[in-house]
Amino acid sequence: TAGILDLQGISRSYSTRQGLFGKKVPVHAVDEVSLSLKEGQTLALVGESGSGKSTTGRIALGLERPNSGYVLFRGTELPATDTPAWRRMRAQMQMIYQDPLAALDRRLSIIDQVREPLDIHDIGSASKRNNKALAMLDAVGLNASHATSLPYQLSGGQRQRAVLARALIMQPALLVCDEPVSALDVSIQAQVVNVLMDLQKELRLSLLFISHDLKVVRQVSQSMAVMYLGRIVEFGETHLLLSNPTHPYTKALVSAVPVAGRRTRERIILKGEPPNPAARPTGCAFHPRCAIARPECVSVCPTFSTLPDGRSVACHAVHTNPPTKEVGS
Ligand code: SF4
Ligand code: MG
């Protein structure tokens, strides 16, 4: 069954020079990624920097092309970039980034920028467009005085609200959020996340939510995919993965997050180097940091197995030795 967004076997690689005069090495930014996002839901993409989350998000919107694999929006493959068909489809998908200041024009008032997509597409009369922009600003919690301000006159949280208003004014069906609240104070994060979730319900938005923050992921998403060096290692319902992580990497990520009402898990400290996409280990790319790596992990990339609860896991240990439920979970 097609979701609103389906990625099928997406790979994206490029070559980079190692050092000033070094030889060119291939970088597999995204490798054989398949995902499905259901209409009106939120799918979180989780992982450290360099895991390929942002590239996956850009590929989902057609902003970057995969070397292989397919991107389907409501069951239809994304048309070639910069064709009229692509622009029509593209209008239904928006992206917001970590840094709202970079997304805004510092010379233009907030309302001018929120209204701009309507101006570009010449939708409605000037006064209608203005009223719609004001209504959108109101929906994200900004008032008429914010509307006439310049970006630098607003706080970081207010700026991200403005970016959200601009992204949603064309009523897109899909919003890709790349670390949308990571740059904000924790207290402000919750406010912006709540605004986003309210609007999601109201507008029946589907969200691809890229984040390394599992506390936010727990709050916003129904399903999550954990990425490590360009590959998905575990994919399933968020509550299942967070309450009973199966892949050793997911276990390590989850162990770092305190859980309310539950005895704190022992924190798993990952040994070894942080992941470097230009020097991806053979076999299971996680093997240099994995406490339970076995000989086959060095040479054989694990395939996915599906567990009874519906999740997919790529790990040799899980394949041959199904996880036992933790006591008390
Ligand atoms: Fe660890 Fe091997 Fe599983 Fe990779 S496949 S996570 S190295 S046990
Ligand atoms: Mg990123």
Image (cartoon, grey):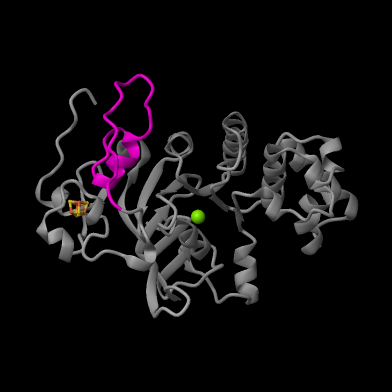
On the image, the x and y values in percent for residue 63 come to 56, 67
Seen at 23% across and 42% down, the residue is 246
Q: Is residue 32 above or below residue 5?
A: below
Q: Using the image as rendered, state which of residue 114 and residue 288 is in the foreground.
A: 288
Which quadrant of the rendered structure holds the C terminus?
top left
Seen at 72% across and 44% down, the residue is 162
Segment colored magenta: 243-272
Q: Is residue 219 left or right of residue 150?
A: left
The prevailing secondary structure element of the residues shown in magenta is: loop
On the image, the x and y values in percent for residue 185 come to 60, 34
Q: Is residue 231 above or below residue 329?
A: below
Q: Using the image as rendered, state which of residue 54 and residue 60 is in the foreground.
A: 54
The magenta stretch spans residue 244: yes
On the image, the x and y values in percent for residue 36 come to 40, 55
Q: Is residue 261 visible?
A: yes
Q: Is residue 170 left or right of residue 19?
A: right
Q: Is residue 170 visible?
A: no
Q: Using the image as rendered, state which of residue 287 and residue 221 is in the foreground.
A: 287
